[in-house]
Image (cartoon, helix red, strand yellow):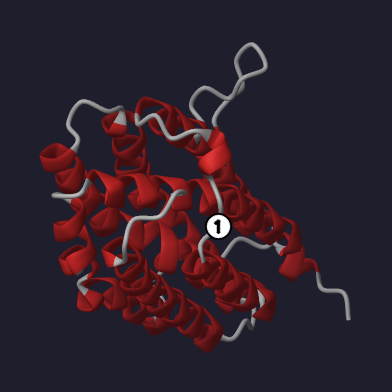
Amino acid sequence: MWQHEEWFAPAESGEPHPALTLAEDLVASCHIDQHPFFEHAAHSRRALQIWVAQELIVTGPFSQLLLCLAAQIKNVHARAMVVEVAYGEHGAPGASIATAAHPWLLDQLRESMQIHPHELQPLPPTQLFLSQLQSICDVSPLAALGALGIGSEKLLIPEYTALRRSFEIGWADCRYQTFLNANIAEDSWHATLMAKAAGTLISFGGDPDHFLEGAKLSIDARMDYYATLLSHCLAPERASV
């Protein structure tokens, strides 16, 4: 049955649902910033190249998932929050170039590291991670909000902070600061917006367990990604990154 409230009513203010708090706690408890990949990358330019090359392959589909999520949300207020996150990832185009878009900033980092586009190929851990992220987002909008909001945007803050330290030590003269700093600065707000959107959907009958499970599965997938990416970096050097 069509319900006016589902499409138009703002969420009630008050304490966040316990599932939202539990999901945020998962970020701190996983200790992604202590993953051994980052210590290895601080002393391996090849590892940093591999990370940038694979993140380039992830960044486009991630942005698309955000836009797909926005299209699935009925409530105008929650949808506006997700649209704001998607806009933050893309920025305003100038002279037909989205100069502030996070994927574009990442591509500028690639260029400064002299990674040729012909070298870019998705590695098995990257393909698996993207497949897992898509599967989580397919469950429901709330699962997608957990995966993209907590398991991606919120997780990215300690993750990219650790990467910034790796670049400071291992490759300080490439253009890492613009890309990493833009993400670290903006993604706390993005994660907050996604959590508010989730709270709105929960208040209208959405299953909070979907949000919590989406966050958990996404965090687990990212941790597994770094483990397999490190194994690749430790393997004998290959021709492509």
Amino acid found under the numbered disc labelled 1: Pro
**Where does the image place residue 222, in percent across and percent down from the top left?**
40, 70
Vertical order, 237 against 199 (above or below): above
Determine whether the residue tagged by mark 1 lies in a helix, strand or loop: loop
Front residue of this view, candidates 171 and 216: 171
**Where does the image place residue 83, in percent across and percent down from the top left?**
62, 47
In the image, what residue occupies the spot 36% across and 26% down? 112
Location of mark 1 (residue):
122
In the image, what residue occupies the spot 58% across and 86% down? 207
| Left or right position of 70 against 222 | right
Residue 140, quarter of the rendered image: bottom right
Rate crowding at label 1 as few (under 14), some (14 to 19) or many (20 or more) other CA atoms within 10 Å: some
In the image, what residue occupies the spot 24% across and 68% down? 32
Vertical order, 213 against 13 (above or below): below
Q: Is residue 201 visible?
A: no
**Where does the image place residue 201, in percent across and percent down from the top left?**
60, 72
Front residue of this view, candidates 218 and 87: 218
